[in-house]
Image: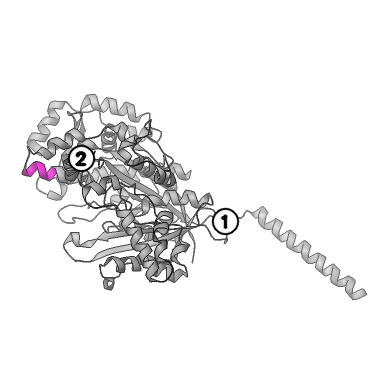
Amino acid sequence: MAKVAVKATSYCLNHAPEIGLLYGNTPYSERIANPDSEFLTGLAKLAQPYDVACRYAPNRTYVGAMSTAELAVAPKPYMENLAAAPERFGKFGEIMPEDEFIGLLDICDVFDLVWLEKGFAASVKEKLSSHPLMTETQLKRIEEGHEAAAIEAECKEHHALPLYLSGKLVACCRQGHDTDENLSSHVLLENLASKAGATLSLLHLIKNAGLTPADIDFVVDCSEEAVGDINQRGGGNMAKAIAESAGCVNASGFDLRAFCAAPVAAIIASSSMVAAGARKNVAVVSGGSIPKLYMNAREHVKKNVAPMENVMGCFAVLLTESDGQSPEIRLDALGKHTVSAGAAPQAVTSALVFEPLQSAGLKFTDVDKYAPELHDPDVTVPGGAGNVPEANYKMIAALAVMKGQLEKGAIPKFVEERGLPGFAPTQGHIPSGVPFLGHAREAIMAGDMTRAMIIGKGSLFLGRLTNLADGASFMVEKPSQTVAAGSISREDVEDVILEVLGDLAGRLGACSLDSKE
């Protein structure tokens, strides 16, 4: 079986507090039912500015401005221990401010859905022209803009959604059809936001890999949004739209949807294509989800906790044939949650963790780090869901005890050594394991880690078609000693042949002397 390498990764956050206040599902639903509620007033007062997002430890870890090891020893709660100075860029990507993100929406819009106010259009184009990844081709896509009155009329008369900055109307997203609810302004804004975030991550991925956009030959999108019209509600293809925006002229692509398990499933499917030789450079990408902004904010406002669900997470992973240096994905020991497995936590953990380890002839302690749902506990604990990563690690450790591979008293040490602090935004598909892949790649290449397991879980019952849950997992580990084809030069081969011939000649000479004696 061909080896598949994790050649590069990228992770970005799109800061979008005002978009979230209007169109995050929790405040949006509240505004319809109770527009004058104390919750909405309180949420607006507690909304955090951009510099806080750039100083917040989980966000900094997500984009690679700090390591997971540094996060593990960082003082908690994170909001009370912000970094001294904001950092926009990390080794993996960036935290993009909301005004530039709205500008990026316009860059990714090919149907004149996004209208920018003239003054805002000029200012955001100037800002984006300084962005290290924005080309002249992309900057030309930013429109000259419209009068504020025209945008207001579009919102009042044609169901466009207004977009604000500091309470000022700066843009709108228009509907794509008068009667098709699948092309409503609300759905299209969600789709454009996901496309824009994924495009940003893909651009960072290409830079991180040292490639050009033309080098990418296939893109797989695994976000949560359904792209289509009334005749094909989820027909797609978000992936190809993202490839177009990033300038990947030689790429094609498709979408893969599996709720929160989609990123892991997409990496497995894409790795299989690379291993089969069907594709060469495959980028797995995902944008963020507007509905998930401020998802747990009702409890945050009640407890007067800063609502940090104000960023949309996105990522990209480049998969190639093994180069003998980059970490490799094991395709011979994949975890899958079967129909018959059931939804009990023990059954899920057994299917996704124990069974693939058993297939590979490994023990629980042979994995350096496990990466299941990496939700930020500063968000989930006050939201009522508890510390999700910690709960997962305790379940993995308990199963190891049941299988006779760990002493009960060693559970706390197992959790501490092989677990990770949560740092991913609560964007559904984003937290399930994949945010650690970049950190794992760094650690494996530095010789600090041998193996990590990435675990994704999904809630299929949300679609009202089945009560089943879902999940998948894979292991990434240091590369095998097998050298990839094409990684040895002709000169290297000639040197080896000459060395072998010289050794053979010496042996023949020795035999000749022996015979004369």
Up-down relation of residue 259 to residue 214 (above or below):
below
Up-down relation of residue 1 to residue 327 (above or below):
below
Instruction: Estimate how packed mark 1 is, as few (under 14), some (14 to 19) or many (20 or more) residues with alpha carbons within 10 Å.
Output: few
Q: Nearer the viewer, residue 295 or 92?
A: 295
Instruction: Estimate how packed mark 2 is, as few (under 14), some (14 to 19) or many (20 or more) residues with alpha carbons within 10 Å.
Output: many
Left or right, residue 177 beside residue 104: left
Answer whether residue 114 is visible to the viewer in this image: no
Q: Amino acid at mark 1?
A: Gly
Residue that mark 1 sits on: 486
- Residue 321 % position (x, y): 49, 57
Residues in magenta, as a range: 28-33
Helix, strand or loop: magenta stretch: helix
Residue at image x 16%, y 26%? 147
Dot label at residue 97? none
Outermost residue to the right: 517
C-alpha gap between disc 2 and disc 1? 49 Å
Answer whether residue 240 is visible to the viewer in this image: yes
Dot label at residue 20? 2
> Circle 1 — which element?
loop
